[in-house]
Image (cartoon, grey):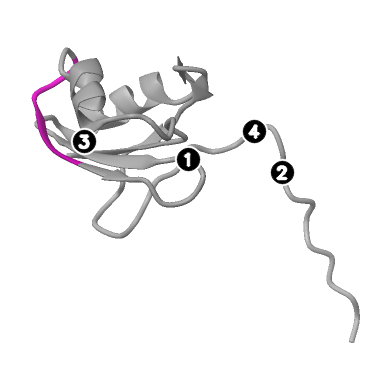
Amino acid sequence: MRIVIENLRQDVSEDEIREALSPAAPIGKIVLIKEGSMPTTVIEMEMTRTQAEVLAMRIDGLIYKGQELRAWAPLRDGEEARPQSTSATAPPRVSTPG
């Protein structure tokens, strides 16, 4: 199962990620993407979908080295189940007679 973690510090390493998450589950592959202002990592772990979702919920919002992390478990390859933001919602669209 995969977990995506965003908003990491620029100086984060794969070893730091592996060390921080290894108590939660056996870690397979780590892909660290350092494009943009905040790195993102995709982690493959040996766990069920439910376990991945629970772990992502536990990570989401944590402060790690001064950064508030965002985490979720992708639904399938190329499709994401991002956490729902409750802080800001878009106003409903209003249709005009035409």
Could you tell me residue 74's position as x and y percent? Answer: 31, 46
Image quadrant assignment for residue 47: top left
Question: Which amino acid type corresponds to the residue marked 3 in the rendered image?
Answer: Arg
Is residue 7 left or right of 53 when viewed as pictured?
right
Is residue 55 left or right of 1 when viewed as pictured?
right
Task: Sort mark 4 into few (<14), some (14-19) or many (20+) by Cα contacts within 10 Å.
Answer: few
Residue at numbered disc 1: 38
Question: What is the C-alpha distance between the residues marked 3 and 4?
Answer: 24 Å
User: Residue placed at 22% from the left, 32% from the top?
Assistant: 14
- For mark 4, give the secondary structure: loop
Of residues 66 and 81, which is closer to you in this image?
66
What span is colored magenta in the figure?
24-30
Position of 12 relative to 35 (above/below): above
Q: Residues at badges 1 and 2 in contact (C-beta under 8 Å)?
A: no
Q: Earlier in the sequence, mark 1 or mark 4?
A: 1
Q: Earlier in the sequence, mark 1 or mark 3?
A: 1
Question: Which amino acid type corresponds to the residue marked 2 in the rendered image?
Answer: Thr
Question: Which amino acid type corresponds to the residue marked 1 in the rendered image?
Answer: Met
If the image is split into quadrants, where does the N terminus sit?
top left
Q: Residues at badges 4 and 2 in contact (C-beta under 8 Å)?
A: yes
Q: Identify the mark at residue 21; answer none if there is no mark.
A: none
Residue at numbered disc 2: 89
Is residue 20 left or right of 22 when viewed as pictured?
right
Residue at numbered disc 3: 49
Residue at numbered disc 4: 86
Q: Residues at badges 2 and 3 in contact (C-beta under 8 Å)?
A: no
- Camera-near label (1 vs 2) is 1
Question: What is the C-alpha distance between the residues marked 1 and 4?
Answer: 22 Å
